[in-house]
Amino acid sequence: MLNYRKDLEKMPSYDGVEKNYRIKVNANESTMNLPPLVAERVQNRLSYVAFNRYPNEEYYSLVEQIAKNFSVEQEQILLGGGSSEIIEKIFHAFGGVGKKIVYPQPSFSMYKIYAKAAEAEGISFDLDEKFDLNVEKFIKKVRETQANLAVVCNPNNPTGNVLTLEQVEEIAKSVDCAFLLDEAYIEFYGKTAVGLVKKYPNLIVARTFSKAYGLAGARVGYMIANSEVAKMIGKTFMPYHLNSLSLATADIVYQMRDEFIPRIQMIISERKRIFERLKKFPKLEVFPSQTNFILIRHERADELNKFLESLDIGVRFFSPTAPGLKNCLRISFGTRPENDEVFDAIKNWLEK
Ligand SMILES: *Cc1c(COP(=O)(O)O)cnc(C)c1O
């Protein structure tokens, strides 16, 4: 007889079975591997990794670079296995039986699962019909529920929309608890709240190398917070939880982050171009995005999804039970030819 931990049976599994589509635009990854110049430097760096040593040097080398870039102390930074691990640990640090964690909906689907894993009570706050977050009501909800942690994803996944820095500050200022801001897509928006950490010690900003820096396979993310807060959250991590290969890779990528600027700019201009073209179809709802993806809605989205699949194009289709996302598809931007092909396929289907 195997007795699992209470409620483990009820935990949803992450449906991460990924098909290898010809055009894979379902997971907000970069469709391009590292720029050749960066790849070369990474390979060279990996050739002298000290496999026999625990990854101290690699860890602190990256921390030092990030601290310098944001003009913060190294003690304010923690690295994690993707920002997923960071977010999970923050939920752990502020969760526990009887604690409440408030997050918007629809947003990153993992918040609900991390809340469960931390044995906390996850409380979702509905976005309005345009997927905007009513800041005043959100603050009220956090205060009324006496939440221990408030979470906002900015720009938001999967809706693509944003809060202004003023709105983020309003939340940081007004909630009486920890406030996690998930900036997984911030490079495509540009308005980071890291500068507010100094003024609001309850603010924790999580970032990742997985999206704009095309490093999803290496699993590296980081957070910036008040140093006392970082010290406490740091206690929830295992020693040496990141491996030296990933750390050394992220270290080079961060050193060479300017090499990614043209790509980020390309994605932003592609986003504008495709948004304008998709907007012209009356039956298709298109939501403005500040990310590397776009959310669309159509009353026969499941058919459109199947049609795209038949062309070996993989987009993200949301299950009809995903709150607020009925008939929605999320499509990441790739190279210009990839985006054109996806657009043409949608157009052909709509005009059929
Ligand atoms: C992709 C994503 C993450 C984390 O990705 P990692 O690969 O774990 O860094 C976190 N939050 C949101 C909203 C995301 O979309």
Image (spheres, rainbow, N blue to C red):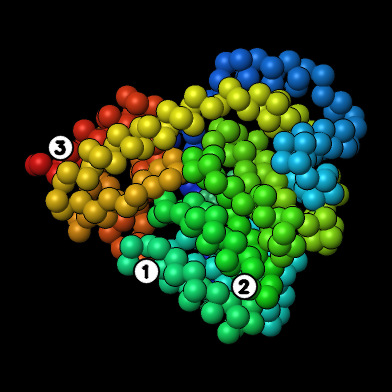
Query: Residue at image x 53%, y 42%?
Result: 190
**For mark 2, does the 10 Å Cα neighbourhood hold few (<14), some (14 to 19), or many (20 or more) residues?**
few
Element on which disc 2 rests: helix
Quote the CA–CA distance across marks 3 and 1: 31 Å
Along the viewing direction, whichever of 187 and 236 lies nearer the viewer: 187
- Residue type at mark 1: give it: Asp
- The picture quadrant where one finds residue 170 is bottom right
Instruction: Estimate the spatial distance between the alpha carbons at disc 1 and disc 2, rounded to whole Å.
Output: 21 Å
Lower sequence index among marks 3 and 1: 1
Within 10 Å of the Cα at label 1, are there few (<14), some (14-19), or many (20+) other Cα atoms?
A: few
Mark 3 or 2, nearer chain start: 2
Q: Amino acid at mark 3?
A: Asn
Query: Where does residue 110 sit, x and y in percent of width and height?
Result: 55, 60
Q: What residue is pinned by disc 3?
A: 348
Q: Position of residue 134 (x, y in %)?
A: 44, 70
Where does residue 285 sit, x and y in percent of width and height?
24, 54
- In this rendered view, identify the residue nearer to me: 119 or 93: 93
Q: Tags 1 and 2 in contact by the CB under 8 Å rule?
A: no
Residue at image x 59%, y 47%? Answer: 192
Marking on residue 174 = 2
Which residue in the protein does label 1 denote? 128
